[in-house]
Image: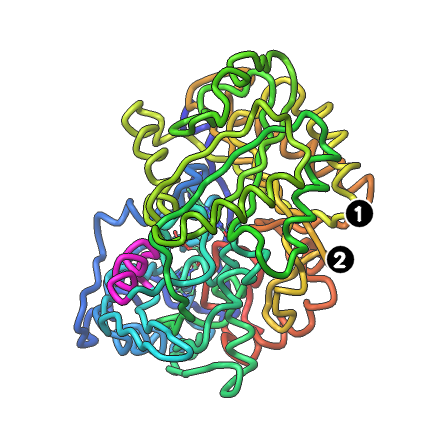
């Protein structure tokens, strides 16, 4: 039953390219790759792990996995396959930490490049007026945090979860509660080194090979494999005041969120939010490690049977600034219209705050809930449509259960660099709404994969029929027409870049955007 719920390589999906009359079988090409001298190594068996990802829905095994030690391992390998021309059917997927949701880092019968093996060069930090860190793209963000903190510095923009690679998040966007101030992670990069689909190694930035630089950021791995990144840093705080408050009125909740992200200075460093739906199920515990500001009032607060909206905020500080920080926070909180009994506060270290999701993940794993299916749905919704969306989705489709946390927070579109490949809704403010659902294998009914996929479809159908102009984040489509619609006016440039940097369409086949040589 488990197999019938998931999409496996033998289920009829065809990713192959055949432009030559007599294509060389992929296995032969990959076998012949062994003759190349590499600093790392190529593995031709026991590669099942590369057919798995966090989504745990798609399983497409590769024929080989490259564990590169150097950038030249990657460029030599890509070049070798590129030079076979259209006679080759081998596709190549860079794999970061494998936290994709729908097989995006997989290459059916092809080659997976395990980017975490690429640990050279070592992380190098530059202090000064515009501090930065140079890292291998296979590096995990959590390691970058620990390393940069030794210099009192840290990246500005994060994801909620830090056990993801730099290459993996930069291929998408990298969004969290800091994005309203700093933009997504792709906006905080000074320079990249990229191996294109022809095997060339190119350094690029805003001023040098800018077309490739912008293309690769948010480019879903379509134009090259990122091998190095230069990430902008800022002074790191030691502590974080972490605050949660509840609303029962959606309009008051979004009004306060939008006000907070519109303030230029003296606002929070992080603004997110989530929806608490009646009987939200086992995965949605929100009060963990928080103390109520007024325990007496809090004990009188009953939440049964209603939908609530939790506004989550954080203010960074150093211990000697606590008094000023508390005054600033009190001032900001005094302008909000949350339910007074629901002010929950916590003070944690900066690392504890940033690594918060990992802690929850470890708890779920300990309960045996790590290997469930994750049919997540992430949407970007224009501000003007968020009420319409909430009324139908929270008031109807998800009225009774959500099968996991539902995040909702606004960001400023002006903080997103429109030159990158990433597409956003065309409004000055848009919301990220993330349905982080889990489906239990072998279950039926509300916890099953089928039920949640159907629920996702109802949400998407509603967005289309009501013409909400929503964009998917971490999107996955089956046809090029759907991708064309997704990219809208950016599609022409996207296609042009594919032709320039990966003309044989070797790279990142898991997205199913380009299936043939251009
Ligand atoms: P992989 O899954 O290994 O790869 C993802 C894609 O990037 C694939 O197409 C792959 O081919 C490509 N790729 C990987 N490395 C490279 C490279 N070096 N060069 C070019 N292409 C490459 N996203 C957010 O924005 N904000 C969040 O808060 C957030 N939280 C998350 C929490 C969890 C628990 C999970 C599972 C995901 C979360 N994500 C979030 C999504 C996450 O950012 C993406 O799924 C990301 O791609 C995962 O990184 P990875 O290293 O696992 O990449």
Q: Is residue 252 left or right of residue 359?
A: right
Q: Is residue 75 left or right of residue 498?
A: left
Using the image, determine if residue 230 lies above or below residue 285: below
The magenta span reads: 138-151
Which of the two labelled residues, at mark 2 and mark 1, occupies the earlier sequence position?
1
Dot 1: within a 10 Å radius of its alpha carbon, few (fewer than 14), some, or many (20 or more) residues? few
Between 426 and 460, the one nearer to me in the picture: 426
Residue 219 locus on image (x, y percent): 54, 65
Residues at circles 2 and 1 in contact by the CB criterion of under 8 Å: yes
Q: CB at mark 1 closer than 8 A to ligand 1? A: no
Residue 265 locus on image (x, y percent): 59, 60
Residue at the bottom extreme of this rendering: 208
Between 52 and 469, the one nearer to me in the picture: 469
Residue at the right extreme of this rendering: 466
Name the main secondary structure of what is drawn in magenta. Answer: helix
Between 301 and 273, the one nearer to me in the picture: 301
Q: Locate residue 192: give its quadrant.
A: bottom left
Q: Quadrant of the C terminus?
A: bottom right
Q: Is residue 14 left or right of residue 259?
A: left
| Residue at x 48%, y 81% (from the top left corner) | 205
The reply to whether the magenta stretch includes residue 145 is: yes
Q: Which residue is mark 1?
A: 384
Residue 483 locus on image (x, y percent): 65, 57
Res 225 visible: no
Using the image, determine if residue 491 lies above or below residue 348: below
| Residue at x 82%, y 45% (from the top left corner) | 467
Using the image, determine if residue 101 lies above or below residue 509: above
Numbered disc 2: secondary structure: loop
Name the mark on residue 427. 2
């Amino acid at each position: 039953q488990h197999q019938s719920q998931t999409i496996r390589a033998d289920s009829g999906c065809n990713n192959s390219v055949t432009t030559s009359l007599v294509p060389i079988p992929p296995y032969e090409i990959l076998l012949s790759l062994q003759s190349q001298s590499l600093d790392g190594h190529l593995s031709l068996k026991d590669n099942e792990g590369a057919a798995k990802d966090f989504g745990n829905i798609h399983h497409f095994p590769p024929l080989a996995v490259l564990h590169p030690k150097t950038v030249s391992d990657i460029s030599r390998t890509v070049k070798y396959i590129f030079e076979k021309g259209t006679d080759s059917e081998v596709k190549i997927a860079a794999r970061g930490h494998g936290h994709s949701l729908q097989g995006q880092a997989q290459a059916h019968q092809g080659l997976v490049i395990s980017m975490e093996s690429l640990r050279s060069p070592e992380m190098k930090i530059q202090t000064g007026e515009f501090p930065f860190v140079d890292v291998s793209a296979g590096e995990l963000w959590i390691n970058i945090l620990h390393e940069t903190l030794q210099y009192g510095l840290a990246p500005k923009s994060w994801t909620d979860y830090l056990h993801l690679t730099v290459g993996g998040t930069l291929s998408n966007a990298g969004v969290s509660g800091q994005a309203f101030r700093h933009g997504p992670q792709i906006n905080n990069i000074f320079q990249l080194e990229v191996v294109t689909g022809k095997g060339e190694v190119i350094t690029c930035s805003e001023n040098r090979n800018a077309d490739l630089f912008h293309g690769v950021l948010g480019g879903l791995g379509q134009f090259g494999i990122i091998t190095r990144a230069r990430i902008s840093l800022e002074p790191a705080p030691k502590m974080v005041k972490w605050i949660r408050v509840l609303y029962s009125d959606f309009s008051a909740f979004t009004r306060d969120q939008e006000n907070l992200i519109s303030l230029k200075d003296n606002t929070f460093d992080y603004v997110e939010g989530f929806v608490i739906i009646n009987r939200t199920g086992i995965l949605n515990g929100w009060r963990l490690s928080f103390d109520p500001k007024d325990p007496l009032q809090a004990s009188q607060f009953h939440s049964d049977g209603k939908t609530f909206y939790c506004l989550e905020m954080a203010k960074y500080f150093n211990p000697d600034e606590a008094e000023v920080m508390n005054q600033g926070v009190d001032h900001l909180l005094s302008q909000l219209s949350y339910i007074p009994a629901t002010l929950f506060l916590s003070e944690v270290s900066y690392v504890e705050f940033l690594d918060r999701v990992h802690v929850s993940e470890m708890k779920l794993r300990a309960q045996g809930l790590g290997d469930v299916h994750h049919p997540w749905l992430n949407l970007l919704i224009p501000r003007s449509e968020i009420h319409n969306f909430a009324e139908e989705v929270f008031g109807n489709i998800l009225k009774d259960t959500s099968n996991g946390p539902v995040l909702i927070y606004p960001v400023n579109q002006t903080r997103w660099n429109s030159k990158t490949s990433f597409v956003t809704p065309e409004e000055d403010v848009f919301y990220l709404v993330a349905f982080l659902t889990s489906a239990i294998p072998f279950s039926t009914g509300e916890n099953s994969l089928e039920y949640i996929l159907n629920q996702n479809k109802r949400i998407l159908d509603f967005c289309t029929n009501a013409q909400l102009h929503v964009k998917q984040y971490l999107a996955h489509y089956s046809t090029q027409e759907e991708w064309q619609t997704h990219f809208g006016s950016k599609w022409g440039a996207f296609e042009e870049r594919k032709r320039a940097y990966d003309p044989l369409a070797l790279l990142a086949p898991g997205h199913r955007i380009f299936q043939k040589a251009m």
